[in-house]
Amino acid sequence: MRLFDFNRAPNPRRARMFIAEKGLDIPLVPVNLYAKEQLSPEFQQINPGCTVPVLETDDGTYISEVVAICHYLEARFPEPALLGATPTEQALVLMWNNIVENEGLPAIAETLRNLSPGFRDHVFPGPVSYAQMPALVERGQRRILQFMDRVEQRLGTSHYLAGESYTLADISLLATVDFAGWVDIDGRQGRPALADWHARVASRPSAAA
Ligand SMILES: N[C@@H](CCC(=O)N[C@@H](CS)C(=O)NCC(=O)O)C(=O)O
């Protein structure tokens, strides 16, 4: 197996943290997003969506999308369970992971990609150019704060995001809270449950992956 990766980006970090929690050693293939290597014809053969991470399995299958990569690895290497043990836990892990993916990460991406000169004419991943819309920055910032409030409320009553165990939902949230720092938002400020949770999960060795 190999993981196509970019060490600065939040979604590959989610995959690397998952791999580290599983105790796996999967070689990394760097794809330099700053040099737009993800748009090269060679990489488009691997993932026409032009995103990382991508896992290449031993039989040569390319799997993009973090949740699909994690699902594959969990099926092959079940311990420790990171996608829930019971049907209810599994549903809650996917539920919270989806909430992070659909509300948290896009809000930060909307803010950063409409603000940073590095994303001029590249507001969305993929080969098609879209111009920045600066008016979306302020809306994105509000959406980030709304998301942080939502997880603060949840973590006020739940040790980890999806329940009593550390799971993919926590991995995704850690990458997201740290990613918000790119647009100068520290979700821990004024949110004690999120701050306490962050201190616990960020101290796991996998957080450095
Ligand atoms: N939904 C995808 C998101 C992947 C994604 O957006 N990755 C970013 C890096 S964090 C990327 O490759 N961006 C390429 C670009 O902006 O051109 C997943 O779960 O893997």
Image (tube, rainbow, N blue to C red):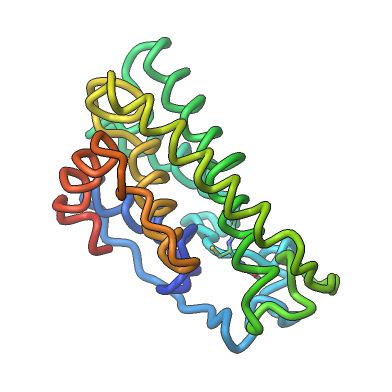
Q: Residue at x 23, y 63 (%)?
A: 208
Q: Residue at x 59, y 40 (%)?
A: 103
Q: Quadrant of ligand 1?
A: bottom right
Q: Of all residues shown, which one is farthest toward the bottom?
A: 35
Percent across and percent down for residue 138 are 65, 58
Instruction: From this view, report whether residue 194 is shown above or below residue 26.
Output: above
Pick the front one: 134 or 88: 134
Instruction: From this view, report whether residue 184 is shown above or below residue 40.
Output: above
Instruction: From this view, report whether residue 1 is shown above or below residue 39.
Output: above
| Residue 81 visible, this orientation | yes
How many labels were placed on the picture? 0
Percent across and percent down for residue 191 are 31, 40
Q: Residue at x 46, y 78 (%)?
A: 30
Q: Quadrant of the N terminus?
A: bottom left
Tell me the quarter of the picture where residue 164 sits.
Answer: top left
Q: Residue at x 50, y 68 (%)?
A: 4
Left or right side of 142 for 88: left
